Image (spheres, coloured by chain):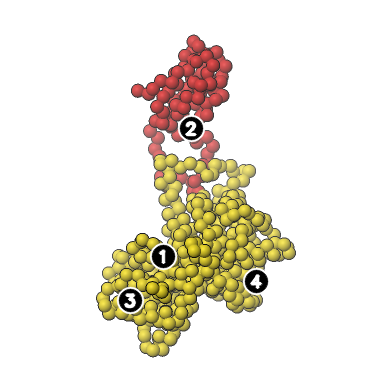
Chain colours: A red, B yellow
Amino acid sequence: MRKLKGWKEIPIGAMIVEPGSSVEFEVSSWRTFKPVFDKKKCTKCGMCWIFCPEGAINLNKDGTYDVNLSFCKGCGICQRACAVKAITMVKEG
Amino acid sequence: MKRVGLSGNYAVAYAAKMADVDLIAAYPITPQTPIVEKLSEFVANGELEAEYINVESEHSALSACVGASLTGARVFTATSSQGLAYMHEVLFMASGLRTPIVMANVNRALSTPLNIWNDHSDAMAERDSGWIQLWVTSAQEAFDATLEAFKIAEEVLLPVMVNLDGFILSHTYEPVVLPDESLVREFVPPKPMLNRVSPKFAYSIGVVGPPEIYYEMKYQVVDAIENSRHKIKEIDKEFGNKFGREYKFVNEYMMEDADYALVTMGALTGTAKVVVNALRKEGEKVGVVSIRCFRPFPKEDLVALLEGVKGVGVMDRAVMPGGPSNPLFADIATALYGSSRRPLLQNFVAGLGGRDVSVEEFKAMFGLVKDVVREGRPRSCIYVGLRE
């Protein structure tokens, strides 16, 4: 796990001065269910990528999609958005 | 330099004008209204070039100040009582975002029952919001403290509240020395502030601070206000050099050889001094300490002044229902806890909701302090002037 900054190292005024800092913020522990992608059913439509509120869906080289579990909160919106039911929400072990 | 007759409210308005504020957010409330009225006059007749926003509430007034301050603008607003209470959540944001806002709070009792008169319950309820709090005892002090407030706020990046007693100070006309505007501009020059929003420097504000970071961010405010003490002293000294008046954290009167003292805040300090003069003539060794800088609390100054005194009465003008004492007493008792030479302390409550505190009542308080010293232990809080 990365080292958290002390109060002297943090910019004052609750500011975030570097863009894109949310990349440093892991949310994987928030999840109860995780999406599992079935590449065979995937039609590469990209609806899961569009609907994911966290931007946690990655585009694979072959045009199918996958999830970055560091940023997936397990909301299940991708499963609802998938017209061909290529995504299943599976309970975390 | 000129000597003019001004009310406490107008003295504050003149100070904000001379500090050349960029933005004023105005919402009327008694007894503060003449401050923003006077400022609107200055803007309307071209004496002050500033953005004057008529907002729809005090919540919006302070929110507008926060936003403008984050762009680096010098901002000012004023309020009282219910207005300050309505600003409550934004007060904490202003200190957390480190916005150097200056606000005059014309002290007035809080409802219920509805009361427009003076006591200290409004400011005491916002004691822990991370604002620096200055308290004044005259119209001249109101002017001077407001000027100092701009410099303090911008140096330590914390908001400053200047407290003046409703009606007793806000509506009473007193002689006030107004310095030359050029000298004031030298004292509070336009200051480019660090880390403000601009097209060149973009950042996120108003962010979420989860448990991993909130504690550290909150501590930054604790540290900033703790360490503002030396800066406040330095600025007060500079003010003294420039304008010939210096105030310090606490104002002491006849304390050199005092056996008994009364601690006060605000305009009633004047009455306490009159009573001290009278009692001194009768041979009583009495004195008064009035607190000018309430946050950060002047622990060391108070300990130095009160150690060795036999008995000290603390006059609260606000109550802390269900608490162990009342707010000012609690702070003073805490400050003196570590001292082996601490005086006997007696809590008084007086002057709630604008009730007069007479010369006789002040005399009685000094007498009671003497009594408890003779008895060897303090009594529970004495509510001066309360009818049974």
> Would you name the residue on which mark 4 appears?
B180
Measure the alpha-carbon separation of dots 2 and 4.
54 Å
Residue at the right extreme, as displayed: B45
Between the C-alphas of marks 3 and 2, the distance is 61 Å
Left/right of residue A21 with respect to residue B189 in the rendered view? left
Which quarter of the image is occupied by the C terminus of chain B? bottom left
Asked where in the image residue B202 lies, by quadrant, the reply is top right
For disc 3, the marked residue is: B311
Comparing B100 with B29, the one in front is: B29
Q: CA distance from mark 2 to mark 1?
A: 49 Å
Residue that numbered label 1 is attached to: B319
* Residue type beneath disc 2: Val
Discs 1, 3 touching: Cβ within 8 Å: no
Where A42 sits versus B188, above or below? above
Label 1 residue SS: loop
Mark found first going from the N terminus, 1 or 4: 4
What residue is drawn where x is 37% and y is 67%?
A: B329
